[in-house]
Image (cartoon, rainbow, N blue to C red):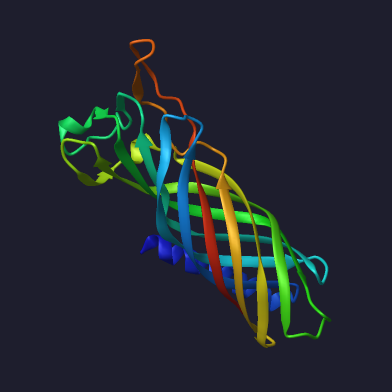
Amino acid sequence: MKKIALAFGFLLVFQVISSAQEEIRFGIQASPTWSWMRTNDKFLESTGSNWGLKFGVVGEYYFTYNYAFMAGLGFGFNHGGTLLNGYQQGSFWPKTDLSDPRLDTLSKDAKLHYRVTYVEVPFGLRFRGGSNEDSRMKFYAEAPIFTLGFVSKALGDIRGNTPIQSDDENIRKDVNGLSLSWGVGAGIEYELASNATVVAGLYFQQQFTDLTDDSGSVFDSGANTWKKEDSKGAFNALSLRLGFFF
């Protein structure tokens, strides 16, 4: 409830500012999201995706009629995906107090499912255009969009080739608390009234910091020894932006 109150407090600030300056507008957005993991390690393969949701408030400052700075505050729920372990053995969540000690070390073909919730702060540039300034329907593009993310919750599931299956492990200590990503988006907006505009668009987001904490280890069968698991694991996401500006 505190997070929701914070989001609506942010929305109220934009409402006060917009009443004083015509070049600033604010709104709310809710975006169904599809995300998946990727790594730079060929033995850790992306094998599943997550359905999630982005929800938050957005503000825009138009320094010309067509161009604006945009920023917001919101939440990204259930981001991540599933990784398939290709190592003979691996310990991937060593900081987590797993529900069963048999899950501390996983065999080949075990699946690690990440479900991470972020508090997100996006900011970037926005362009809008149309047939003329009086047109009710306009198209828009946002690029680049940078997003700071702060982990508020991280859950993990263990599937595949494991002695038991596990759900809802608290893996907060085994993911990085700070995220940085970039993205682009485009869509259309329609003015219902002078102070009411609906927005629909498609967005792509790519995390370029490491989601995983890299505190685990894997067994290198070639060298016949254990080594640090230091791969970079991050998520990509597609979102359908649905918004309303006041």
Q: Residue at x 69, y 87 (%)?
A: 194
| Residue 60: image location, x then y, percent | 68, 66
| Residue 89: image location, x then y, percent | 29, 24
Residue 155 shown left or right of residue 144 in the figure = left
| Residue 120: image location, x then y, percent | 52, 54
Is the residue 63 above or below the residue 115 in the image?
Answer: below
Quadrant housing the C terminus: bottom right
Is the residue 34 above or below the residue 132 in the image?
Answer: above
Q: Residue at x 52, y 43 (%)?
A: 179
The foreground one among 193 and 226 is: 226
Is the residue 40 above or below the residue 7 in the image?
Answer: above
Q: Residue at x 61, y 75 (%)?
A: 199
The foreground one among 55 and 162 is: 162
Residue 35 shown left or right of residue 14 in the figure = left
Residue 91 shown left or right of residue 40 in the figure = left
For the view shown, which residue lies furthest in the bottom direction?
193
Q: Residue at x 57, y 40 (%)?
A: 208
The number of numbered badges drawn on the structure is 0
Q: Name the image quarter holding residue 94.
A: top left
Is the residue 16 above or below the residue 134 in the image?
Answer: above
Quadrant housing the N terminus: bottom left
The foreground one among 229 and 70 is: 229
| Residue 40: image location, x then y, percent | 51, 32
